[in-house]
Image (tube, rainbow, N blue to C red):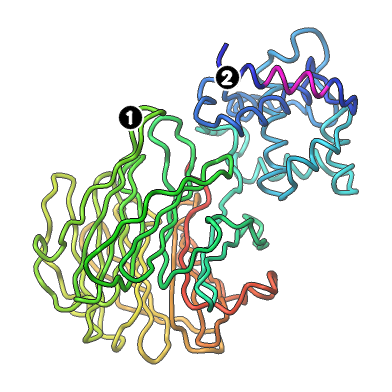
Amino acid sequence: MPLLATLAELIEVFSALQAKGWNCASTNGEALSRVLAMRQYPYMAFGYVTSATWLDSTRPDYITANKAGSGADADDISNGCGVLFLNWLAYELGYSWRSIVQAGATSLAQTYTNLTGRTDGASRFFTVMQTRFPVGQPSQLKVDNPFPLLGMRLMYLHQDGSPMFLLRHYDGNWSATPLLTKPGAHFSAIGCTAVTHRLSRLTEFHHCGISNTTLLHQVVLPSDSIIADAPISFPHALTSLSCTSDTPGNLVVALSDSSGGAMLMTRWEPDRYDDIATWSGPIDVKSSAGNPGSVSAISCASPADNELHVCAVTSDGNLWHTIRHPNGAWDAFGYVKGQTGNPGPIHAVACASPNPGEVHICVITSDGRFWHTIRHPNGAWDLFNTRSGFPSPAIAVGCTRTSLAGELQVCIVGQDGSLWHAIRHPNGAWDPFGWVEGQVPDATPATAVACAQASLW
């Protein structure tokens, strides 16, 4: 019997001993055993996924009451409803698995009430599902945990150099997350991205930091356990970095160093679960794309499989762009301001790809202003446009796509260490910048920021 199935059976035994209402022969108990076992062995869960079966059905209510009758624990529609609801409690509403288990009852609705003191569990859950997965439209969901929906992970550096982490939920609320790095880490620059595991298709959160001549990388697995790779050393002090994923399983890290160089490192995920990921590089970008000058900041994004866009800021405040095509060929660095207009000397850059083939570039100029442009799939550029609404001059910027096609989320750091967030919607409209500390009071002071899509299901 596979480890996942064995663990699920053990969980059902302990649920019976707990005697709080988790019934292994019904929706709630079977769902609990599945989600806890999948949390422990996420890469073995692929053959057990049932969420899409419920989403693509008429969506019967197994929250208010368990599915009745024999064989309920083998019903994929019932199981899909249950596992989605429990994962929603944990990864959208933020309740710990310990508290969920202790809130056990004879129905999932009563478990929700025990946790929250509210009685709207089923209606609230169904509304969320309808908003993101409308009835009658194929869900195309391949995992049992799509949460947080439309969420964004934010990584920032505290002024003491320690990395901190926040999560923005689909409803606009923010929450602090547990420390997602090994204790004692202190960095001068950071980067993060979501990576789809090549085999399981689950989302991993990768984050990197630099400390003098050293690159450090860690992976946060769907179980929230952390894998730390061995540090990678370079001959010169590193000055900036950016992370993206150009194909499932691969992490690309763009780096600049104190010599003005621009480099790429790639982390290749193994083809088997028990193999070890390997790094390749560094690749000298300038040797392939030409030398635009001394690089002081760098960012990268992937708008299509195996296609990588790199943006580099040079010490004279100019911005350059190049593409590594799927066949490995590079375009020469192009002078971006010649296409977009000149917003002034640039000192920080971030880019992301909210739509296939499209790259959004966000920059901070030396006067602390924020600017945005788009490179379209046909190679045309929009003129730089500026957005305001934050009281302190900006010093750093991060941006990411979300699960909603065309949506760009942007975070900036003010000179006073404040964090600000805005959304550019698919129709091109912008929300005003909002003060993050208004929802997470301890989220400052910051010196750098990076953003990543929360899930890639």
- The reply to whether residue 441 is in sight is yes
What kind of residue is marked 2? Leu
The image quadrant that residue 432 belongs to is: bottom right
**Residue 29 located left or right of residue 328:** right
Image height of 315 relative to 178, above or below = below
Task: Bin the neighbour count of mark 1 within 10 Å (Cα to Cα): few under 14, some 14-19, many 20 and up.
Answer: few
Q: Please report whichever mark, 2 or 1, sits nearer to the chain's N-terminal start.
A: 2
Q: On the rendered image, what quadrant is the N terminus found in? A: top right
Q: 17 and 418: which one is in front?
A: 17
Disc nearest the viewer among 2 and 1: 2
Task: Bin the neighbour count of mark 2 within 10 Å (Cα to Cα): few under 14, some 14-19, many 20 and up.
Answer: few
**What is the number of the mark on residue 271?**
1
User: Which residue corresponds to the image point at 33% horizontal and 29% vertical from the top-left?
Assistant: 271
Task: Report x, y in % for residue 91.
Answer: 66, 46
**What is the number of the mark on residue 91?**
none
Please tell me whether the stretch drawn in magenta is mainly helix, strand or loop: helix
- Provide the residue span drawn in magenta: 8-15
Task: Report x, y in % for residue 198.
Answer: 38, 34
Q: 104 and 68: which one is in front?
A: 104
Q: 292 and 53: which one is in front?
A: 292
Q: Secondary structure at mark 2?
A: helix
User: Which residue corresponds to the image point at 34% horizontal and 69% vertical from the top-left?
Assistant: 361
User: Which residue corresponds to the image point at 55% horizontal and 71% vertical from the top-left?
Assistant: 421
- The reply to whether residue 339 is in sight is no
Image height of 421 relative to 289, above or below = below
Determine the CA span between mark 2 and mark 1: 20 Å
Task: Name the residue beneath numbered marker 2.
Answer: 3
What kind of residue is marked 1? Asp
Task: Report x, y in % for residue 226.
Answer: 52, 46
Q: Secondary structure at mark 1?
A: loop
